[in-house]
Amino acid sequence: MIHDTLKGTPERCNYLSYLLRLWRVSGERSVWRASLESPHTGERIGFASLDALFAFLREQTNNNTEEER
């Protein structure tokens, strides 16, 4: 399986781990924000919405699934 690290460098792995942080931003409309942090590198990536977070996670797991075929 190939995993794109937060920096985008492909590496082989069978396991993905991130520290997930979620917080709500209040305003006209309450919005959830998120960040993922690599426990290996400490690198963090932020997401303006839960949809963006889910898209990133789908991309990471789809890359793994496609290679298994």
Image (cartoon, rainbow, N blue to C red):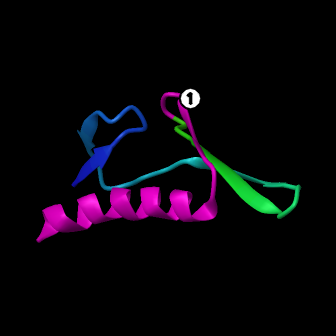
Q: Residue at x 53, y 30 (%)?
A: 43
Res. 4 image quadrant = top left
Q: Main secondary structure of the magenta part?
A: helix
Where is residue 34? Give x, y as percent: 66, 51
Where is residue 48? Give x, y as percent: 63, 50
Q: Residues within 10 Å of mark 1 (few under 14, many from 20)?
A: few
Of helix, strand and loop, which one carries label 1?
Answer: loop
Q: Is residue 15 above or below residue 58?
A: above
In the image as oriented, which residue stretches furthest toward the left? 69
Q: Residue at x 36, y 56 (%)?
A: 60
Mark 1 is on which residue type?
Gly
Left or right relative to 43: residue 62 = left
| Residue 50 magenta-highlighted | yes
Where is residue 58? Give x, y as percent: 40, 65
Left or right relative to 63: residue 53 = right
On the rendered image, what quadrant is the C terminus found in?
bottom left
In the image as oriented, which residue stretches furthest toward the bottom? 69
Say how many tags the image has: 1
Instruction: Out of 19 and 32, give the one closest to the viewer.
Output: 32
Left or right relative to 18: residue 58 = left
Where is residue 5? Give x, y as percent: 37, 39
The magenta span reads 40-69
Q: Residue at x 21, y 55 (%)?
A: 1
Left or right relative to 46: residue 27 = right
Q: Which residue is mark 1?
A: 42
| Residue 43 magenta-highlighted | yes
Q: Is residue 63 above or below residue 19?
A: below
Q: Residue at x 39, y 31 (%)?
A: 7
